[in-house]
Image (spheres, grey):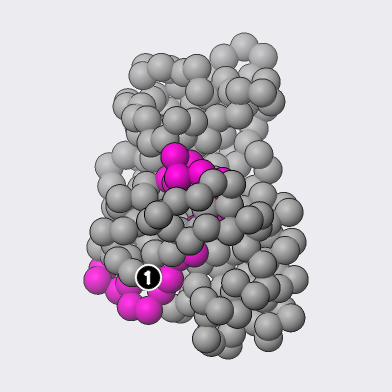
Amino acid sequence: MSHKVEILNIEDITHDVRSYTLEKPNGYSFTPGQATEVAIDKDGWRDEKRPFTFTNLQDDDYLEFVIKSYPDHNGVTEQIGQLEEGDQLIINDAWGTIEYTEEGVFLAGGAGVTPFIAIIRDLHAKDQIGSNRLIFSNKTEKDIILKDEFEEMLGDQFINVITDESTDEHIDLDGFIDKAFLADQIDDFDQPFYVCGPPSFNDAMIKYLKELGANPDALVFEE
């Protein structure tokens, strides 16, 4: 079933990422980590559906997405980046993506962190963060989505990796996270791993984790 929902609020998260607060249809439900197909309620765009993950808590009286816009793609995210409060989106029912099962390691590349936002917010609200860790890879420091909130929720179990610049505060790598980095950062590969990022990131992480003895659960979202 599809629903037209109004954009109630738009907030800048980083230089190219915004959060969109939307009306919540009566009876609409989802679980943390789930997504829905989203289209823009404008001529020429209603059939252009893309998957986005809910980032709010399921009991909130609104819905929220955190969306990175890609201006050079001339596609849905570029168009969403031009929307204003009062504009409408079309959403369908929620469907399963990454499902949290038990404490483990979340590995995110860039905007691939979005499925983990609601999961970690939900765990934090229930005081169930436990030993969960988030290893978050970004090109530059300005790309880190919700940095302050993740630090507050996870403390030193939030590991930032910056791949394209040198920083004093975070772990600097020349290129992608590699197998040696994972072996150095993780001492138990018999725990759940939740992986989400661009296809090249997912492929590399899954390959390295399997070689290290893990059984990762992966998710790919199109940019």
Residue at screen point 66% across, 23% down: 72
Residue at screen point 62% across, 63% down: 177
Residue 164: image location, x then y, percent:
59, 47
- Compared to residue 210, the image places residue 60 above or below, namely above
Residue at screen point 43% across, 58% down: 170
- Compared to residue 216, the image places residue 223 above or below, namely above
The residue that disc 1 covers is 157
For the residue carrying disc 1, how many other residues have a C-alpha within 10 Å: few (<14), some (14-19), or many (20+)?
some
Residue 65: image location, x then y, percent:
44, 39
The image quarter containing residue 202 is bottom right
Residue 68 appears in the picture as rendered: yes
For the record, the magenta segment spans 126-145
Number of marks: 1
Position of 69 compared to 25: left or right? right
Per the image, label 1 sits on a secondary structure element best described as: helix
Residue 185: image location, x then y, percent:
52, 76
